Amino acid sequence: MLITIKNLVKSYKKTGLKSNPVISDLTLLINKGESFGFLGPNGAGKSTVIKILMNFIRADSGELTINGDSILNPTIRRHVGYLPEQPIFYDHLTAEELLRFGGRVSDVPDDVLDERIDVLLERLLLSHAKKKPIRTYSKGMTQRTGLALAMIHDPEICILDEPMSGLDPMGRKLVTDFIMDMRKAGKTVFFSSHILSDVERLCDRVGVLNKGNLLFCGPIAEFKNLTGDIETSFVTMVENDNKVRE
Amino acid sequence: MKHIWILTGITIKEGIRNRVLLGIIFFALVMCCVNAVVTGSFTRDLGKVAVDVGLSTVSISGLAIIFFLGMPLLAKDLDKLTVYLILSRPIARRDYIIGKFFGLSILVLISVIILSIITAISVKIIMGLTPDYIPELFSWGIFGMAVFFSFLSLVIMTALSILYTCVATSSYMAFIFTIGTYLIGQNIELVRTLLKNTNQGNSFSISLLNAASWVFPNLSAFDKKTVAAYGLDFHLKDLGMTTAYGISYTLLILFITVLVFNKRELT
């Protein structure tokens, strides 16, 4: 397994004695070279799981590893490309400087880095803005810069939190093509999304999370076959779970 | 170490391109002109006043850089989560804190150097216009030493501002804590000495002050304006001790900051 999440529990402390459980005993195993879609309604806990995986927040309990190493070890992130839901960068840096930073801290040799910066920016239609400060970018351009930063060190694993968020149809196509290419290249892609049609096209397997509980984990075809189409399967599953919990 | 220097570089780059830095340097230039006007209104000790006002300008501008440039840069990292772009890389949280500290300290150093040169020019001009009022023992070496200690106190404040930004729930609180610490640090030794010499104050208040003096930095130890203005005698051993105090206090604060930041949830 490339990404292992075992018995993950996370709760946020409330201003009283009670704590609010966000993730309840989640176990998720993601294989090498797999494209895994993480689905769930707003507030299901998808971003929380991703943030725990990136070691931004800490689990109450559970075992999380990437490539067999604990997520607490920062060196494992040399093999990981991460795109946050709403990437925010240093305003005064240019895309080129940002990508150079990302490449250098991930030990990409300078000559390789120069070429990779140009290729990525061209691919994501950002070449014209290479030397412009990021504060002048539109939301879509910022999102694409985030994707370029996630890919600058040619990572083995890509963890993308709502990669289509805030993108116009052109931007969505660019990102979709990017994820497809990563899949073809044998990279492991783990991403959360609300856009079920994209998930259907891009994923080998999906996991459905609702209120911190994993409702389904399996091949996309199996999920679709539950009702005949992916959207109905998703809505029915979440609604049934909500009814049970009420 | 490589990661620390890359982070230091990116912090300096972001800071230098920020218009706030230009604003602060402009303010310092204005203060140097004010120095000439203020000094002219005195009838004696003109040289002393010029050095005093000049060195105060360096300190105030350095503080302004910490408050209006350094702290907002760090607060943005934590509030708007630009820190994700750094910590999603193979960078340890410890390296992030140290890199930010070096970056901000170098920004303060650059500003102190620029401001000291401007101040020295204004002092030189004032002394040139009023040669009779140059303190007998004034030397540029002691002036430089005063600037160095001013920088050292700013480095301590930089480390404290990073700690408070990591501890506080909002950048406003961090700002208040840092200003409070600066004011306490500047005055605690004076109040302690005053109470001791006048035998005023009860044992509780004296114990409280003694305890506080172990927690808050004694920033008045780094204030060498009077020594520089009059060219007073000083002991190298005292300077060495003050330097060692400043460096160890900074290292201790950075150590605590790393411990706190390692526990912090970045949401």
Image: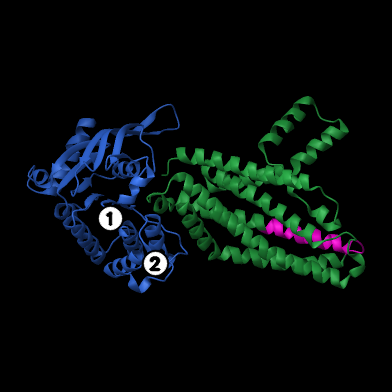
Q: Nearer the viewer, residue B255 or B194?
A: B255
Task: Give the main secondary structure, helix, strand or loop, of the magenta stretch.
Answer: helix
Q: Is residue B168 at all visible to an observer of this figure?
A: no
Residue at 81%, 30% (x, y): give it. Answer: B201
The 10 Å Cα crowd at callout 2, few under 14, some 14 to 19, many 20 or more, is: many
Q: Nearer the viewer, residue B148 or A42?
A: B148
The residue nearer to you, when weighing B73 against A99, is: A99
The mark found on residue A82 in the picture is: none
Image quadrant in which the C terminus of chain A is located: top left
Q: Would you name the residue on which mark 2 appears?
A: A96
Per the rendered image, the range of residues in magenta is B42-61
Image point 82% across, 49% down: which residue? B234
Chain containing the residue with disc 2: A
Q: Give the residue type that dot 1 points to.
A: Pro
Q: Residue at x 47, y 49 (%)?
A: B96
User: The disc labelled 2 sits on which kind of residue?
Assistant: Glu
- Compared to A236, does A128 lie above or below? below
Helix, strand or loop for disc 2 = helix
Q: Is residue A215 magenta?
A: no
Q: Residues within 10 Å of mark 1 (few under 14, many from 20)?
A: many
Q: Nearer the viewer, mark 1 or mark 2?
A: 2
Q: Which chain is blue?
A: A
B58 is within the stretch colored magenta: yes
Chain B display color: green
Q: Where does residue B74 sit, x and y in percent of width and height?
A: 51, 52
Q: What residue is drawn where x is 71% and y is 66%? A: B117
Residue tagged by mark 1? Answer: A163
Can you give x and y, in whole percent of width and height, for residue A19 in the image? Answer: 38, 30
